[in-house]
Image (cartoon, coloured by chain):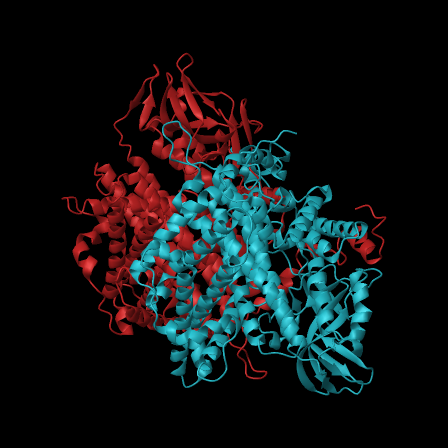
Chain colours: A red, B cyan
Amino acid sequence: MESVDHLADERGKASFDVDEMKVVWAGSRHVLELSERIARLVASDPAFQKDNRTTLGRKELFKNTLRKAAHAWKRIIELRLTEEEASKLRFYVDEPAFTDLHWGMFVPAIKGQGTEEQQQKWLPLAYKMQIIGCYAQTELGHGSNVQGLETTATFDPQTDEFIINSPTLTSSKWWPGGLGKVSTHAVVYARLITDGQDHGVHGFIVQLRSLDDHLPLEGITIGDIGTKFGNGAYNTMDNGVLRFDNVRIPRNQMLMRVSQVTREGKYVHSNVPRQLVYGTMVYVRQTIVADASCALSRAVCIATRYSAVRRQFGSQKGGVETQVIDYKTQQNRLFPLLASAYAFRFVGEWLKWLYTDVTERLQANDFSTLPEAHACTAGLKSLTTSATADGIEECRKLCGGHGYLCSSGLPELFAVYVPACTYEGDNVVLLLQVARFLMKTVSQLGSGKKPVGTTAYFLQVEHLMQCSSSARKAEDWLKPSVILEAFEARAVRMSVACAQRLGKFANLEEGFLELSADLIEAAVAHCQLIVVSKFIEKLKQNIPGKGVKDQLENLCNIYALFLLHKHLGDFLSTGVISSKQASLANDQLRSLYSQVRPNAVALVDAFNYTDHFLGSILGRYDGNVYPKLYEEAWKDPLNDSVVPDGYHEYVRPMLKQQLRNARL
Amino acid sequence: MESVDHLADERGKASFDVDEMKVVWAGSRHVLELSERIARLVASDPAFQKDNRTTLGRKELFKNTLRKAAHAWKRIIELRLTEEEASKLRFYVDEPAFTDLHWGMFVPAIKGQGTEEQQQKWLPLAYKMQIIGCYAQTELGHGSNVQGLETTATFDPQTDEFIINSPTLTSSKWWPGGLGKVSTHAVVYARLITDGQDHGVHGFIVQLRSLDDHLPLEGITIGDIGTKFGNGAYNTMDNGVLRFDNVRIPRNQMLMRVSQVTREGKYVHSNVPRQLVYGTMVYVRQTIVADASCALSRAVCIATRYSAVRRQFGSQKGGVETQVIDYKTQQNRLFPLLASAYAFRFVGEWLKWLYTDVTERLQANDFSTLPEAHACTAGLKSLTTSATADGIEECRKLCGGHGYLCSSGLPELFAVYVPACTYEGDNVVLLLQVARFLMKTVSQLGSGKKPVGTTAYFLQVEHLMQCSSSARKAEDWLKPSVILEAFEARAVRMSVACAQRLGKFANLEEGFLELSADLIEAAVAHCQLIVVSKFIEKLKQNIPGKGVKDQLENLCNIYALFLLHKHLGDFLSTGVISSKQASLANDQLRSLYSQVRPNAVALVDAFNYTDHFLGSILGRYDGNVYPKLYEEAWKDPLNDSVVPDGYHEYVRPMLKQQLRNARL
């Protein structure tokens, strides 16, 4: 099989060691090798093909997902894959399925909130998939406000059971993935009521469907909530609706690690700290940030390769036209996204460390860093998912008209990604939480309480409130110290300004509501600083490989200077930099684009994605775009016949002026 | 049939005459009445239902579109609708179809570029739909760069024919709507070659399919290019691929109004000015701007109504929660979009006038305003379509998780709208054209040549380069003169700064390429000024109806002050305003939100959209969202059976540990 590499020239231009960069991107040589092995396994297995996903009707699509999930599980068993390998396999199969919730939410919920006894009973069943579980929290009427959930779990001391009930239409569980058609069990969140008293929301293990015939158990109504955004995309998932008509479960199915209901119906707390919940939250959000860098890098990989393939304008009469990647307008949109993908990768890596750190502290009963860690992960979840969703769509536009075809892979990537902006905390709600934490940090500055972790820069508040940037020439903007100071000063000043204005409100809560738009901007400034500073920290590590560190430095600077330009109003209005300095930063940014340009294709090669995983003709590794686009078109079901179905009934009568008598 | 209006309270709060606002939005009482009549006609006709569009497979979906198009044409004939009514009917049917291209591109191309004789021959056939035409311009390898098209039309003097040919794979026509499966004819753009000489791109009428059996004629290969972004959405359109293998057409099928090929094969120009083409371009782009206001207003209508229905957080124990529309964070995202919808409506109205003006001038051989009109429409097309695409997605996010369901109507609205950012001129390419025109305007400032139309403010360049804003208190930002001066000064200064930096380049073209990102920002500043100034001009008209003008003034100010905040970096770095003044503008913006809040629902009611046209459960007029969402879910094909197709083959063997032997 001969193969041509249309991008060979581009690859030849790179001035760094791509293989070493692959290690940096993967996080370690171990992960790189494991990922490569599993990615190839999936790509070479015809059962995991995904080419036709965007043309299937909902039922066909869903059935196909069930098949893939079963096949994946079969392979996992046959090959005796480790947990790490199995999870990578599911990742490379790249199709949202009920298994995501089973492994990602149901199992962790039992592990985190169940007692030892409960874990011993339920986890082995779940590990073997003898039961399939989902996570039933959100309701038709309540998503963001978990405390407002309406489902009830009332203890009946006579029978030693809880009665799970959906008292209103809006209390119907709504959205849980895997619920609609597959799950046999769920962790259901409901208001615990004992002896007429409401103890707030707790988790309960509830069996939903018969293990014999898969029919919903008595008193339970379940269905799918309908088609979602995009072709293929999340429609492979059975997000579900669930209603309970006084369904009884044994008392020991309440998840009782933190609090219990006794046989007598007494509500008591164990000595396990409630803060454990926050540890789980840090974990989940860390995976979301990692997913963001993955999704963004896929889109950037497609857009970068196609920008190198595509030529438009700029030819001398009849000569070759200019590669669109050579246009500054293209670079100015594309390269900051390339830089963002790397930035999110490294901040995600750091979050992994943070999770370990938090866990160790929790085990030592040290809760001191929890609020900061919580705010930090909330903010980073919001920042990276919003930027990624917007970035994927920008990459699609960067591919011109062809980006609108499903065969580009970008429409599905966008549609499947965007829910990340809403689930696990709406991005705006999360930023408000960050802002509250920042306001608290500011208010405690005078007190003995020292800001920790990512808020430690508040220690230098006095300096940061009055410093002015030392940048005198464009190259000064390459200095990490200059960049950091500018981002720290901007963040501190925006927080302090908000705090001062809040202080003028008699009612603090009213102030929060009134100034929420400004508070959000302060939170964004803080979160962007975190990403920039973690990128800079990463560069302090020993990074081997010819030219690898140079490339990462360029990307780090592009990320920071691009943000500086985008949020110029913040930097100027707080007096952190002058217009002249802003203009120097912009000059430097343009020059950085020129340095990245010859390395761009190699920088996306370093993500090490197979063509199967990318699922994009525009992003093909070999750049052989046009013949393959042409080939792909003919596979559309509409091309099954030359004359379309409907011609005789509808088109011909129109052309022949015979509509009057036609039955339509 | 009893009906409850859950939004009655909201409607009661409005302090203006909604019916009069409907007239303002429609443009005239005549248009309002006509629209209402036709919208009802469509909504009440079961043949035009569109509920299930997002769940259909491609073939079913397409066949359904053919049916609707035939039914629409049947009704148009039966009811003897006028051209205006027929076009409204197609608009309210709200489903992209081959007829859009037939009426919107094929017929106008013949009208604009055909001779009298050609018009007499082809238009009657097209008017009766005895032939169906499309517009075959873009190719697999060329979209933006029309001059780079590769299809050839070579004159053969021996037979008096043109030979239409696709010499390369990339010369395949690609994207034309209506081409893939339906059109019998096309206006094909190809390089005209006579006697070995290339005269550039010209239009030719080519028959594609037999009028007897609909099969492609000899030498012609046609197909659909495959599935596109989104469920339903543009997949109702047969965007096509087309290749010619030396297809012969008579000489008189070249569109010869502007230039001709004689029987002897001589290429000659008529005395019809070539600039006529620009008149058509102004027309097409004006309709695109009108479409933008329509699409954005639909999204805003849905998000506003649902924001008034939805409640989350903020309750006192057990009390009613806060309507999300009461949160400043929601207002700060939603109300600028509401204001933009109105702003785009009015600038679109003005563009209609501009088109008339340009046409009259062309007829009088006055080409003086053409370049300005061309730049202005290019810029407004870019500005309004980008803002609308982003705005629809923002409205989707403003609806929380439920916005991700197709039943919210927003996913399809987004997917069907976004191509507007790419077709009829890529938005970035268009802004570069605007920037070139601005640079020319600046360079001619010293000369006798006066800037006209939307660039007339350059006459005051001296004042605008050195003025500083007179805003001293928040209310000063309500003065049109203060707003206009700030926007004019910002636009002038950004253009002049670019021109000065361009002047330092030895090679002007190189300068254009290097500074393109800044040039684009200058173009955006200019275009935003146009929208703001046309809104302000609109408010100088007599606008009857209680409170109507007040509301529009609020919206105009929100639009301007929101832009000022969003682009604060521009305003500060050019020294147009101070940080203090920016902060005052922000205070004023917040206060304007409070004034719009009680009128928000009424302001979207004024768009006068039927529930059928909106196609959104979240945007229902009566606000009866949750019961209807619940009802709708059960209609998904996946709910046809309780136990899903695939359970026995794939899920059960997993649960029963029998995968090893299963055939998947």
Above or below B165: residue B288: above
Q: Nearer the viewer, residue A385 or A520?
A: A520
Q: Residue at x 71, y 45 (%)?
A: B41
Quarter where residue B571 is shown: bottom left
Instruction: Report the residue that reaches farthest toward the top.
Output: A158
Is residue A603 shown to the viewer in this render? yes
Q: Nearer the viewer, residue A395 or A493?
A: A493
Percent x, y for residue B453?
A: 53, 72
Is residue B607 shown to the viewer in this render? no
Above or below A527: residue B126: below
Percent x, y for residue B203?
A: 71, 74
Image position of B599 (left or right of B216): left
Quarter where residue B646 is shown: top right
Q: Nearer the viewer, residue A512 or A82?
A: A512
Q: Nearer the viewer, residue B462 or B124?
A: B462
Above or below B588: residue B501: below
Image position of B463 (left or right of B280): left
